[in-house]
Amino acid sequence: MPRFDAYLTEVQQRMRLAPIDLIRAWTAAEIAAVEGAIRTAVTGSGIVGAMIPNFDGTNQAKGNKAADFFIAAISEHIPQGTRIIAATGAGYPDRIFIVGATGHCMELKATSHWRDGDSNRRVLTSSPDKMIRLVNSGDIDTPPAHLICTVLYREENSSVQGVRLDFLEPDSEVSIRLEASTSQRLLTQGGHQKFMLS
């Protein structure tokens, strides 16, 4: 299986960029600080068992509502010296988890059915643009560490059941699916045969 660091290098090369390191290993102290801060905030907020308001729509909409509810509920309970901020703009990561002066990539996910054997895709990123911008602005560490925070919820009563933290490493295995797309601009400029019927 491909490694996350290899993917991040390859995707930059495919975009004809001079690749920079976009992932590094976590230190044990960093993992302890992030896990401890989130554990404190989860406990202090009482979010486990709480009902997610207006919990309807598609699975993606529910996932977004669960993630937004999680951030809103725990924010005031995050210990001093740590915070979670939005990573502005489209793409990966959703958030930045800051400990002291160090920003880590934090992706928020939500699911009603965590099963260790589930092989359904959980998309992380297809583009390095946002990470590169965050590195260049100093908003995240150079190179950054990566964290997935998954809110586990119960569909039947719209309640939070728990939170899972995954601290990704450079050698974390990922699935890669190349994707081709076009646009109206590319179709207009293309040298292929075109017909407009009206």
Image (cartoon, helix red, strand yellow):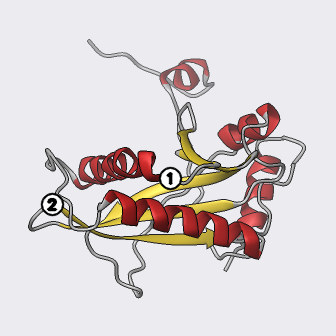
In the displayed image of the protein, which residue is found farthest to the top? 198
Instruction: Using the image as rendered, state which of residue 133 and residue 185 is in the foreground.
Output: 133
For disc 1, the neighbor class at 10 Å (few under 14, some 14 to 19, many from 20) is many
Considering the numbered disc 1 on the image, is that residue within a helix, a strand or a loop? loop
Residue under label 1, please give it.
78
Q: Position of residue 162 (x, y in %)?
A: 33, 71
Residue under label 2, please give it.
158
Q: Position of residue 113 (x, y in %)?
A: 27, 75
In this rendering, would 187 be left or right of 168? left
2 vs 1, front mark: 1
Residue ID at (33%, 47%): 64
Q: Is residue 191 above or below residue 56?
A: above
Residue type (three-letter) at the residue carrying disc 1: Ile
In this rendering, would 9 be left or right of 180? right
Considering the numbered disc 2 on the image, is that residue within a helix, a strand or a loop? loop
Residue ID at (60%, 62%): 147
Q: Position of residue 170 (x, y in %)?
A: 76, 70
Q: Where is residue 41 in the image (x, y as percent from the top left)?
A: 44, 59
Residue ID at (47%, 64%): 40
Residue type (three-letter) at the residue carrying disc 2: Ser
Sequence-wise first label, 2 or 1: 1
Residue contact between numbered discs 2 and 1, judged by CB atoms under 8 Å: no
Residue ID at (90%, 43%): 18
Distance, label 2 to label 1, CA atoms, is: 24 Å
> Quarter of the image containing the C terminus?
top left
Numbered mark located on residue 114 in the image: none
